[in-house]
Amino acid sequence: MDVIVGGQRLEPGTKTIVRLPVTTDLDGSAISVRVHALRGTRSGRTLVIVGGQHGDEWKNVDLLRQAVEMLDPARLSGTVLVVPVANPIAFGTGQRIVQPASDGPDLNRVWPGTHTWLAESLARVIDRDVLVHADAVLDCHLGPWGSAFGAVFYGEDYPDPSVNAATAALGRAMGYQALGHGKVVQVFPGERSLMGYAGVVRRVPAVGVEIGGLGFDTQLEAEWTADGLRCIRNALRHLDILDTPFEYPERILRYGRTVRVNPSVGGLLIPERDPDQLLREVHAGEVLGRVVSPYTFEDLEVLESPCDGYVMYLPRRYPVRPGQWAFGIIDAASTEWIAP
Amino acid sequence: MSAQQLPVTTDLDGSEIALTLHTLVGSGPGPRLLLTGVQHGDEWLAIELMRRVVADLEPRSFRGTLLVLPVCSPIALRDIVRITQPASDGPDLNRVYGGAHHWLPEQIARTIATQVLPNVDALIDFHFGIWGTGIGFVGYGIDFPDAHVVERGRQMALAFGHPLVHRGRMASHFPGPGSLVGYAGAQLGIPNMVAEIGVAGFGRAEEDRWLDVNLHGIRNVMRQLGMLDDAQLPPSTARTLLFDVNHRVEPTRGGLLLPVREPDELGRAVQRGDLLARVVSPYTFAELERLEAPTDGLLTLIARSYPVRPGDWAFGVADTNPATSEWLTT
């Protein structure tokens, strides 16, 4: 069966880079999205991996670069379509969003793209030429400079029960040590997020991958990248695209609720532990970090764990504005340890 | 010790913009040393350095006065960007000292020039690597009109104890007559030096290592100025390179910068032609550019893997050509 992406036929056993034109911007630049298309020598399902919806989460570029390098089309049964930078405009400026003056600046809130704002145009092209082929989707995010995340999560509120079941199975099969689940359609990130849209409209399982962060020591960041690659291999194995063995941890923490512990004031955030450890057990009332004034050096705020739980996201020392990423605590009351 | 608010102006959002100046008065009379940081809002690690200075330095332990201005541009810090007011014709605070207009950077510069600098006998202006980069050298101006000011700046820079010392035309060339050090040295006759030492985004241990170098350097300069009596810390190196030429090795194309060594080491010796990093396309992953050492020398700038636009900070090499440099044995 022919596989055609952006008008380009993919030959079996090849890696191809397809350029999808999107629009022309005010500075005259031609905006396009690149897709790395890896077609196996045998038929099978298609996994779409999307990174860089938010331009400040750029470490995924390197993760997906290594993923493309890692995968040999000769060993694939099916197709892998990788979009390393879904939002090149936001990436080019290091910002989360694109076109702040639009009423849809966050690409991950505008799928499948109705209007002609930049974010919506990007969504529309990726949907039309890439998502249309998907049997499953991985949506990659991670912490921007100063913060790190550690979870794979999936939605459980799609209208189609079979999508819910397939999504849960894919999330679990990825074998990351923390597995979140929740109402991604009704609550967060919403029906028009990539995960929401893929599950509701395209009716394919879509899992969020939030592993790693930026500004930590070299070895730690390399370990997070290795975790991300392992999860991608497991997803491919689950979909029978790759036949390598599953690589699993001993157990997985499945959870349903994360509490954000982010600063309410701006200042220099100083964590109690630096580097802290993802999935470290914490207790209610435990001091996680302090926000000090960059001017007087006084304590402005003490960040405490609101409950017993586990660290899902964490910061290093860095300057924060109100609401910025600091700690995410998995509520222990919402957890269970499960076998992979 | 006291922290004093120096009002600057009122901004469009209604906020009152002010500078916070810490004054640590020692146990007896002596020189007044000013430490300044965050003229550029993305060089925020200076805050942690200043916080440690204020927390650790016991006023009874020194003579004179230590003035600490941790954040010169609160507006640039708020947005973690280099410049203060992009739409102005003087957006960079460190280029507008002596300016007569009312743009935010010029009002800040004027506040510092009129309310802080008149009470100062010596100045260290700190700059740090921004996210993804590290910088490692100190410098002093060789082109101030008063030779005495030049010599005292030289003594401060050497006393700091860093092995790389840049001899710069600070007032006439870079960072120029409107920079803080250029203005203070050329217009006010205040001996000064710059300390450009620190990495950001390399992890806590690596970053703290370079913060400690700054802390030791400040104490060494205080000793040189006669503010501290305790023994000089041992030099961090047996030799000091005084250099005139610092080659920047920057990408000409945007992409993902992938250094050959990660983490690299400031001060590492390189040879002309050594590959320092590659720039790859974030889209096709194809190699776009190779960054090589343009000369034999020592690394004054390093980078970790991070996305760069054309001209962004990457590497710097202090030229060890004997015609433009000099080794001093400690």
Image (spheres, grey):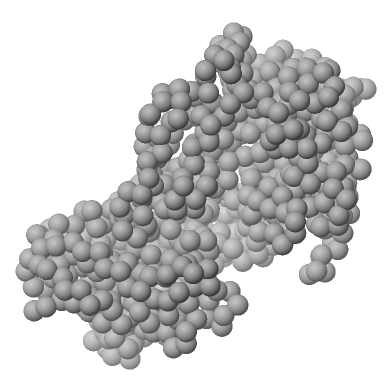
Task: Give the residue furthest to the top.
Answer: B329
* Left or right of residue A21: residue A304: right
Foreground: A327 or A230? A230
Q: Is residue A104 above or below residue B210?
A: below
Foreground: A308 or A194? A194
In the rendered image, residue B106, in percent from the top left (x then y), is placed at 82, 51
Residue at 50%, 24% (x, y): give it: B298
Among the 4 quarters of the image, the one containing residue A207:
bottom left
* Left or right of residue A127: residue A332: right
Q: In this view, does B262 lie above or below B329?
A: below
Foreground: B284 or A107? B284
In the rendered image, residue A179, in percent from the top left (x then y), is placed at 34, 67
State which quarter of the image contains the N terminus of chain B.
top right
Q: In this view, does A269 lie above or below B232?
A: below
* Left or right of residue A70: residue A219: right
Residue at 9%, 67% (x, y): give it: A12
In the rendered image, residue A199, in percent from the top left (x then y), is placed at 32, 83
Q: Is residue A278 above or below residue B206?
A: below
